[in-house]
Amino acid sequence: MNEIILKLKDKDDKAAYEYSKILGAESAESDKYLHMLPEFADMLDDKSSYVRTRAFFLICNQAR
């Protein structure tokens, strides 16, 4: 599994959230993570609501 996805699914929710904010900020400035859209979409089916929320946030950032 991709290292980015592993960090976003980390059991340490605070660390994963902070990492998602970094990715979100980078996504607002460039299309650096656009290629990861399918992986973010797959995260929407995760059992953790935190992971699903991070995925939705990142998908929205890619839609700009």
Image (cartoon, helix red, strand yellow):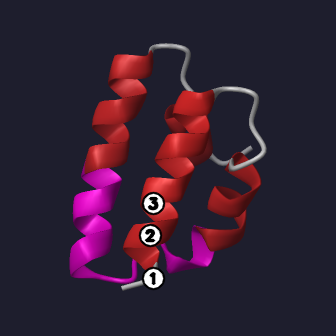
Q: Is residue 29 above or below residue 6?
A: below
Residue at horizontal 37%, vertical 45%?
Answer: 20
How many numbered discs?
Answer: 3
Q: Separation of disc 3 and disc 2 at Cα?
A: 5 Å
Residue at horizontal 34%, vertical 19%?
Answer: 14
Q: Separation of disc 3 and disc 1 at Cα?
A: 9 Å
Q: Quadrant of residue 31?
A: bottom left
Mark 1 — residue?
A: 63
Mark 3 — residue?
A: 58
Quadrant (top left, top right, bottom left, bottom right) of the C terminus: bottom left
Residue at horizontal 51%, vertical 67%?
Answer: 59
For badge 1, the amino acid type reads Ala
For badge 3, the amino acid type reads Leu
Check if residue 35 falls in the magenta segment: yes
Cβ atoms under marks 3 and 2 closer than 8 Å: yes
Number of residues whose C-alpha sits closer than 10 Å to that of mark 1, classed few (under 14), some (14–19) or many (20 or more): few
From this viewpoint, is residue 35 visible?
Answer: yes
Cβ atoms under marks 3 and 1 closer than 8 Å: no
What SS does tag 3 mark?
helix
Residue 57 relative to residue 29: left or right:
right
Query: Magenta residues?
Result: 22-36
Q: Separation of disc 2 and disc 1 at Cα?
A: 5 Å
Mark 2 — residue?
A: 60
Number of residues whose C-alpha sits closer than 10 Å to that of mark 2, classed few (under 14), some (14–19) or many (20 or more): some
Q: Is residue 44 above or below residue 64?
A: above
Q: Is residue 43 above or below residue 47?
A: below
For badge 2, the amino acid type reads Cys
Number of residues whose C-alpha sits closer than 10 Å to that of mark 3, classed few (under 14), some (14–19) or many (20 or more): many
Which numbered disc flags the more N-terminal residue, 3 or 1?
3
Cβ atoms under marks 2 and 1 closer than 8 Å: yes
Can you give x and y, in whole percent of width and height, for residue 60 in the image? 44, 69
